[in-house]
């Protein structure tokens, strides 16, 4: 529902990967819900994990820092 509501092709792509493991009728229902949604080249990730990781990246962790002065 979230992928369809938000027009989220990335999320729909991940969901489609697991449809073969589901009950066939349930999988058909999901396919109808996701009909027409496709990933777009260059689209940013829409996962909550990616959003959290981006916040850490914005802190500058892992970048080179200048040497502290020796006193």
Image (tube, grey):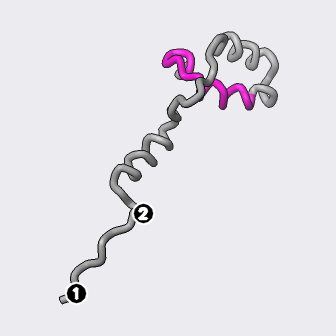
Image coordinates of residue 25 in percent, x first then y, are 78, 15
Residue appearing at x 33%, y 54% in the figure: 59
Residue appearing at x 18%, y 89% in the figure: 71
Most prominent secondary structure in the magenta stretch? helix
Residue appearing at x 74%, y 31% in the figure: 18
For this view, does 54 lie left or right of residue 21?
Answer: left
For this view, does 7 lie left or right of residue 59?
Answer: right
**Residue 16 colored in magenta in the image:** yes
Image coordinates of residue 64 in percent, x first then y, are 38, 67
Label 1 residue SS:
loop
Instruction: Name the one closer to the observer, 37 or 63.
Output: 63
Task: Residue lying at the far bottom in this picture: please name it.
Answer: 71
Instruction: Name the one closer to the observer, 28 or 7.
Output: 7
Numbered mark located on residue 62 in the image: 2
Question: Which stretch is magenta?
Answer: 3-18
Image coordinates of residue 47 in percent, x first then y, are 52, 36
């Amino acid at each position: 529902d979230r992928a369809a509501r938000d027009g989220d092709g990335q999320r729909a792509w991940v969901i489609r990967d697991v449809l073969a493991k589901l009950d066939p009728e349930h999988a058909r229902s999901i396919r109808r819900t996701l009909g027409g949604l496709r990933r777009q080249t260059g689209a940013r990730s829409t996962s909550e994990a990616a959003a959290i990781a981006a916040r850490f990246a914005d802190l500058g962790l892992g970048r080179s820092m200048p040497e502290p002065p020796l006193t």
